[in-house]
Image (cartoon, rainbow, N blue to C red):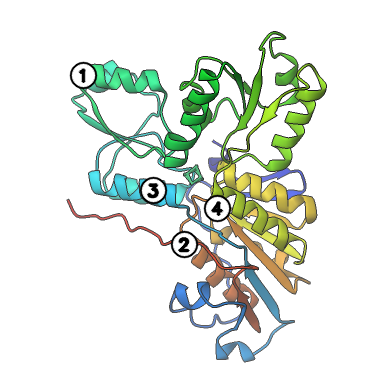
Amino acid sequence: MEAALGGERKEEGIRIEIALGGATRTRRGAESSPLLTGWHALWHTPGAVSSHPQDSSTQGPALEVIVARSAGICFGVRSAIEVASRERQPILGPLVHNPKVVDDLARAGIPILERYEELDLLAARGVRQVVITPHGYPRELKEQLRSRGIGYHDATCPVLLDGVYGKIRRFEESGRSIILMGDPAHAEVIASRSYGRRVHVVHSETDADRLPRDLGRVVAICQTTITLEKFSRLVEYIRANGYPGLESVDTRCKPVKDQQEGVEELARSVDAMLVVGGLDSSNSRSLARIAGRHLPGRTYHVDDADRIDPGWLVGVRRLGIGAGTSTPRSQLQAVMDHIRRLHGGVMTFGNGLASSSGSSDVEVSTEH
Ligand code: SF4
């Protein structure tokens, strides 16, 4: 897995810091000012907020740090963490694409299984209950769980359960075939396509070229975390290449839409952008891609505060921060604290260009 290799990956003008398997690098700037004492003081204050008085010992130019609108954990992930923490049953795959959240659950003693475990083996090992992650789980595998007497706590996000799967069913009932734009290897897409009989997954123009020519009426939907730019581009490509009547329904979820718009707005007005989130998080990577279009070479994607290079702050007066839907508030706070230590001078903090979602982290209980 990339995160264990160490080093640096570059993607469309984004610098992506890759964690070094458990090693920590700590860089201290000037004597750090006291940490912020409460996220709420930062998060809920409209507009810019003066930094701590100790910051008057300016070392360099003032730095304004702005958190993008709606950054951080979404209701689907928050609810899934609550389910996993409460039920304390083995989870079928990493709950979310965020190593910190997964580590916290594992440290609390909750087993993380392979997502597509051999179910007979699971039953033979005496597993009687499992937790399904917010990405969803293929319909036939849910049936197999039931037939083997394995119960499941379904933490599939309601956006998928009530929205996407319902649309797939209704579109098919109306006689249409479905083109699902997304990564065919992503758990969400693997699950979503199983809820229809005529779902074709397209992730690139090459995939689109391989579509059957006789699909009849077709409608395009998308993985909840895809960028609007990619969805629109693929829809236009397919319209121009065999399906001029292709309908399209944007099935990105609201938190993803809000975050993508928030990062785009912010990236237009800052000198550099930092995206905080799992390196294999589709949502976080989309945010980095969006920011990277506006700030090529000055957009950084990190999954840990320690990965922030002090050099990234040189010459930066306004720093934007985005965070994916699986990034806990505590991780965002750690990044803010780290930047404060690295900068060591006058800083102001602001909360995006509009109000945040006000979401909260969920602690994983260690009590049995
Ligand atoms: S990103 Fe969207 S679809 Fe995924 S868990 Fe969050 S709200 Fe649900």
Q: Nearer the viewer, mark 2 or mark 4?
A: 2
96 on left or right of 17? left
Question: Residue at image x 61%, y 76%?
Answer: 349
- Mark 4, residue position: 303
Q: How many marks?
A: 4
Taking 208 as reference, is 156 above or below it?
below
Q: Nearer the viewer, mark 3 or mark 2?
A: 2
Q: Earlier in the sequence, mark 3 or mark 2?
A: 3
Residue closer to the observer: 156 or 213: 213
Question: Residue at image x 47%, y 52%?
Answer: 74
Which numbered dot is residue 124? 1
- Mark 2, residue position: 329
Disc 1 crowd, CA 10 A, few/some/many (<14, 14-19, 20+): few
Amino acid type shown at disc 2: Arg
Disc 2 crowd, CA 10 A, few/some/many (<14, 14-19, 20+): many
Instruction: State which quadrant residue 128 falls in.
Output: top left
Taking 85 as reference, is 233 above or below it?
above
Q: Earlier in the sequence, mark 2 or mark 1?
A: 1
Label 2 to label 4: alpha-carbon separation: 13 Å
